[in-house]
Amino acid sequence: MENQDRAPLVDALKEYQKNRPVYFCIPGHRYERGLGRRWLTEEECGILKYDLTEAQGLDDLHQPQGAIREAQELLADLYKADKSYFLVNGTTCGNEAMLLGTLKEGDEILLPRNVHKSVLQGLILGGARPVYLMPRWIEDAGVSGGISPEDVKAALKARPAVKAVFLVSPSYYGICCDVKAIAGICHEAGVPLLVDEAHGSHLYFTDRLPKGALLQGADGCAQSFHKTTGALTQSSVLHIRTERIPPDRIEKALKLVQSTSPSYLLMTSLDNSRYELACRGKEMAEKALELASFARREIRRLPHMRCLGKDQLPDGFWAAGLDETRLVFGCENMSGYELQKILRNEYRIETEMSDFKNVVAIVTFANEKEDLEKLLDALKGISKRAGERPLACRNLPMPKPAPVVMTPREAYFSPSRTVRWEDAVGMTAAEMIAPYPPGIPLVCPGERLTEEIFEAVEACRKQGCHFHGPQDESLAFFKVIEKEV
């Protein structure tokens, strides 16, 4: 392993400040001087001195030769990748780059139906054809599980034209697929395995959590460092193994989907986060795990409350395990949507997301026990009054995939017309509907809208879900393909 006790980009920016020049470059705020005081006071502006551009000694993300290149090499070394890349457009652009760098227009790709909308965007950009697999459903928990190795093997046998397999592991709920088994199946079939590992950058630093995707044989994965490490929002990374993924195509794709003016604040936060993980990643991961485990035990002791744990995974489960730093909890007498609102409005506790049955809270190394105690106090108060209420409805399983009439790209560029939402069943969708968070599309462009999917969207709408995708935010109207295929 390389000497990880370095942070090349952090050091380059600090060196630049020692004798900083008169500045006539982008950005326009000129170190910390130019921000309006409505936002930040003079004392609060210190970090802005590092918001620079490709000035002398600071390298260039799109053609790295110096500090950025060194920082990315250290990142690859830490995660056992052949190549690693900083992402300033989030894991979204990492997922897009994996698809663009691996597939050609018309190629088939095998992927779970609960992929993030960024994968759909990558399909629109590149024109690949999705072949969907349904994740297994965990009834008691009300969440989607993983994709089984057996399902992947059967699909690859039935569809020999498939050029790649894509997984989500871990999911928003912390469910991890059996990446090792699936990677072996993919490699035997001669195709690469790509993984959206947005929620899993911390899995590489302790044996008490499921292993990360690269350690299990994945050929590429994108991680949101900002989700579980100390990086700034929008800061992510992409790792690849070059045996099956050509780095020149990945780098070409990254130039297409990343900004030509990458933020040095984001990149420096990535370099600094990699340094912190190298120095104390085990301590960070296990602190989060201890805090979440404490909260899980206490939540389970409360009347009417539940919290997902490894012991709830069925025998023969189609996953490598559960990331137990994630709290997936609920109250039997109310929906997850209602529980989240009560936590926010009555107790000033913000959680990551909710669904019909659950609330998801992400616990990281930066939380303290006091944070979890406040959550527990709130849930104690809620549980006391929950017994007087009727049981809430159960969570709705993800509906079966709709018939794919055309590729997402073909649908995106096809003429469309607007119809009333209630008349859209049986028509081909021209736009996406994705409850956000988590950003998993219920409706994808190019799919024939089924009655089952219509009812699932309606159920979400009645709960007040926020949707990404439809032009009409109220969903009174919906765009469909003008000329039916």
Image (cartoon, rainbow, N blue to C red):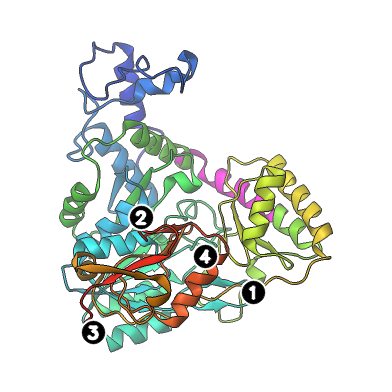
Mark 4 highlights which residue? 461
Measure how far apart labels 1 and 2 are at the Cα level. Answer: 33 Å
Mark 2 highlights which residue? 222
Q: Is residue 243 visible in this depiction of the protein?
A: no
Depth check: give the residue in front, 450 or 242: 450
Mark earlier in primary sequence (4, 3): 3
Mark earlier in primary sequence (4, 2): 2
| Left or right placement of residue 191 versus residue 317 in this view | left
Q: Nearer the viewer, mark 4 or mark 3?
A: 4
Q: Residue at x 50, y 66 (%)?
A: 176
Query: Does residue 225 lie above or below 456 as drawn?
Result: above
Under circle 1, the secondary element is loop
Mark earlier in primary sequence (1, 3): 3
Under circle 2, the secondary element is strand
Mark earlier in primary sequence (1, 2): 2
Q: Residue at x 19, y 47 (%)?
A: 255
Q: Amino acid at mark 2?
A: Ala
Mark earlier in primary sequence (4, 1): 1
Q: Amino acid at mark 3?
A: Pro
Q: Nearer the viewer, mark 1 or mark 3?
A: 1
The overriding secondary structure of the stretch rendered in magenta is: helix
Q: Amino acid at mark 1?
A: Arg
Q: Position of residue 167 (x, y in %)?
A: 38, 68
Q: Position of residue 53 (x, y in %)?
A: 25, 27
Depth check: give the residue in front, 247 or 431: 431
Measure how far apart labels 4 and 2 are at the Cα level. Answer: 31 Å
Residue 394 disc label:
1
Q: Position of residue 357 (x, y in %)?
A: 63, 67
